[in-house]
């Protein structure tokens, strides 16, 4: 596993083209690859771009690719649009994997698992608290084995509100806490799993529940 090198840009993009639209790779992804890193986690502009290389010394093209950046909902969600400060905080604490791909002839060799593990390790080391991605239902067992919670609707508990993340069918969201304090809970009345304590002060009391579509604490 290694950061994307300049010589591998074409192969990196070809690999990401193998993915379906579940990750919604940003339209400017190719442009991002030409940017200097912005922030301690990123390798290219606002993104983390990793490749899986064949055995050393073979001088072959990468066989796996991962593109991750701040989540689009940290900017687009109505609650985030009301608070630029919230957008800034979420962008530095949550990472969204937009694209994860492995060449067909190299699948079932643990490459996708290794790319995700490397991403989680790098994210955790610089203070990120959760990683998330979008996937099709058939991949749910794979991500669950890696410690992700998958659902069509995920709610992020906030001090005075709840940020709901719903994917259009058939896609699902997967989330994985990167630090012990962050929890994914099942609350009475909630439409899906609830992420609590994503940030300090965002925890929920034991008796928290949902009613009429609202978080009740």
Image (spheres, rainbow, N blue to C red):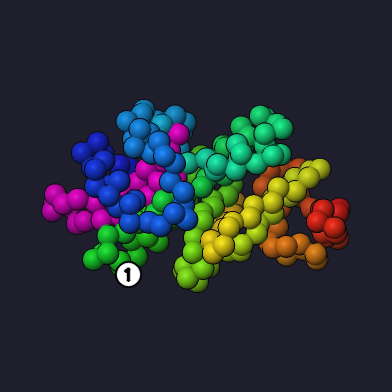
Residue in the foreground of this view, choosing between 32 and 91: 32
Q: Give the range drawn in magenta.
A: 46-68
| Residue 111 placement, left or right of 142 | left
Relative height, residue 169 to residue 162 (above, below): below
User: Which residue is drawn at the image coordinates 28% and 46% (left, top)?
Assistant: 12
| Residue 112 placement (x, y as % from top left) | 37, 60
User: Which residue is drawn at the image coordinates 80% and 64% (left, top)?
Assistant: 189
- Residue 34 magenta: no
Residue positioned most to the left: 58
User: Which residue is drawn at the image coordinates 19% and 50% (left, top)?
Assistant: 61
Residue in the foreground of this view, choosing between 150 and 176: 150
Which residue is under mark 1? 108
| Residue 178 placement (x, y as % from top left) | 56, 52
Q: Is mark 1 on a helix, strand or loop?
A: loop
Relative height, residue 30 to residue 124 (above, below): above
| Residue 217 placement (x, y as % from top left) | 86, 53
| Residue 82 placement, left or right of 137 | right
Instruction: Kindly indicate the quadrant of the structure image that contains residue 127.
Output: top right
Residue positioned most to the front: 169
Instruction: Kindly indicate the quadrant of the structure image that contains residue 44.
Output: top left
Q: Can residue 39 be seen in this view?
A: yes
Relative height, residue 42 to residue 207 (above, below): above
Relative height, residue 145 to residue 22 (above, below): below
User: Which residue is drawn at the image coordinates 32% and 31% (left, top)?
Assistant: 34
| Residue 19 placement, left or right of 181 | left
């Amino acid at each position: 596993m290694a950061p994307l090198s300049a010589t591998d840009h074409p192969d990196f993009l070809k690999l990401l083209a193998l993915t379906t639209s579940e990750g919604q790779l940003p339209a400017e992804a190719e442009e991002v690859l030409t940017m200097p890193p912005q922030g301690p986690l990123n390798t290219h502009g606002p993104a983390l771009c990793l490749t899986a290389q064949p055995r050393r010394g073979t001088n072959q093209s990468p066989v796996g690719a991962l593109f991750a950046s701040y989540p689009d909902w940290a900017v687009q969600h109505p609650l985030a649009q009301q608070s630029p400060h919230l957008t800034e905080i979420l962008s530095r604490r949550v990472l969204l994997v937009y694209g994860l791909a492995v060449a067909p002839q190299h699948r079932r060799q643990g490459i996708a698992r290794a790319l995700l593990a490397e991403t989680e390790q790098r994210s955790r080391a610089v203070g990120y608290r959760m990683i998330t991605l979008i996937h099709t239902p058939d991949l749910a067992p794979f991500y669950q084995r890696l410690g992700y919670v998958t659902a069509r609707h995920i709610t992020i508990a906030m001090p005075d509100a709840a940020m709901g993340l719903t994917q259009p069918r058939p896609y699902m969201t997967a989330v994985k806490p990167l630090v012990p304090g962050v929890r994914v809970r099942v609350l009475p009345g909630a439409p899906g799993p609830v992420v609590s304590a994503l940030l300090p002060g965002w925890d929920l009391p034991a008796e928290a529940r949902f009613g009429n579509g609202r978080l009740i604490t």
